[in-house]
Amino acid sequence: MTSEIKGYVVRGFLDGAAVYAIEKEWVYEGGDPPERYATIDAAAAALECMVATGCTDVRVFAVAPDGTETPLPTYEEALTQGAEDSRRLGEIQVLAYQLDAVLRGTMGGDALDIVGQISARTLLAGARAEESAT
């Protein structure tokens, strides 16, 4: 996703038909163009209204200056990603403690191997963050 966001649109389904939010109501695809909300808070309020009126699979999309829409993660997806990030960070911290112990001589092991493992996990975490941002 681009660092510059032009606004947000909210899309979902009602009885299997694609709908989107306009002025805190929903309309079927093909009508007026979706309203672009200036803030994520306004888009979240529209999302809540759509869910309250029976819409399903409701998502907020960030709109880039060229009009490209990128779905933002759902609450559940964000929680899952946060748990994965915490697990990866924990693995890196354990390896860092092991590297410290090896370098001090209080634990046997191959320091270069540990550095390689730290690098691999850090690169993986960075790639995952880049993937999430696009």
Image (tube, grey):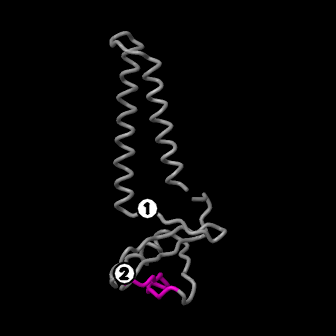
Q: Amino acid at mark 2?
A: Cys
Where residue 133 appears, as percent x and y from the top left, is: 53, 54
The 10 Å Cα crowd at callout 2, few under 14, some 14 to 19, many 20 or more, is: many
Q: Please, which residue is most extreme toward the top here?
A: 105
Asked whether disc 1 touches disc 2, contact meaning CB atoms under 8 Å apart, the reply is: no
Nearest the camera: 97 or 81? 81
Q: Please, which residue is most extreme toward the bottom here?
A: 31
The stretch in magenta equals 16-29
Residue shown at 35%/53% (left/top)? 80
In the rendered image, which quarter contains the C terminus?
bottom right
Query: Under tag 2, what secondary structure?
Result: loop
**Does residue 4 lie above or below 89 as drawn?**
below
Tag count: 2
Nearest the camera: 6 or 18? 18
Q: Which residue is mark 1?
A: 73
In the rendered image, which quarter contains the N terminus?
bottom right
Q: Amino acid at mark 1?
A: Pro
Is the magenta region chiefly helix, strand or loop? strand
Q: Please, which residue is most extreme toward the right here?
A: 66
The 10 Å Cα crowd at callout 1, few under 14, some 14 to 19, many 20 or more, is: some
Q: Which residue is mark 2?
A: 55
**Does residue 106 lie above or below 127 as drawn?**
above
Query: Under tag 1, what secondary structure?
Result: loop
Residue shown at 34%/41% (left/top)? 87
Q: CA–CA distance between discs 1 and 2?
A: 18 Å
User: Horizontally, is 64 left or right of 9 in the view?
Assistant: right
